[in-house]
Amino acid sequence: MDPDKSDIHISDVVISTAGRDQGDWFYVIAEDPVYLMLVDGKGRTLEKPKRKKRKHVQKVLRSETRVAGKIRSGDKVLNSELRRDLAFLARDMQANNLGG
């Protein structure tokens, strides 16, 4: 297994690198050695997460937001919170990349 793909854990933010959802941002809500369960609150809700192989995602960051904390602790998270948080993180990352 690719060593940099094994450091993806629950509550990390990842970008899909393959498939129809390529380029989309997701939170990891569950993991096993081969697969990750991903949600974005829009197309992939908490009720129906996306199962994707680790090799088809790239870790963006270890999120320290309130939503990430709720995922780690097992508290109830709303799909609207996921959407808002991912949109903010994507916008922030894009602003940093364009400005710097």
Image (cartoon, rainbow, N blue to C red):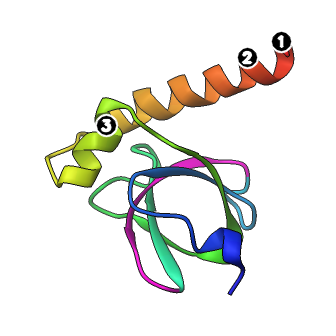
Q: Which residue lies furthest to the left in this view?
A: 75
Contact? badges 1 and 2 (CB < 8 Å): yes
Mark sitting earlier along the chain (1/3): 3
Question: Magenta segment: does it hold 14?
Answer: no
Whether residue 79 is visible here, answered yes or no, is no
**Residue type, label 2:** Ala
The residue carrying mark 2 is 95
**Residue type, label 3:** Val
Principal SS element in the magenta part?
Answer: strand
Label 1, label 3: how far apart the Cα atoms are: 26 Å
Q: How many numbered marks have been drawn onto this rendered protein structure?
A: 3
Label 1, label 2: how far apart the Cα atoms are: 6 Å
The residue carrying mark 1 is 99
In the image, residue 68 sits, relative to residue 36, either above or below, namely above
Contact? badges 1 and 3 (CB < 8 Å): no
Q: Which of 53 and 64 is in front in this view?
A: 64
Question: Magenta segment: does it hold 24?
Answer: yes
The residue carrying mark 3 is 67
* The magenta segment: 23-33
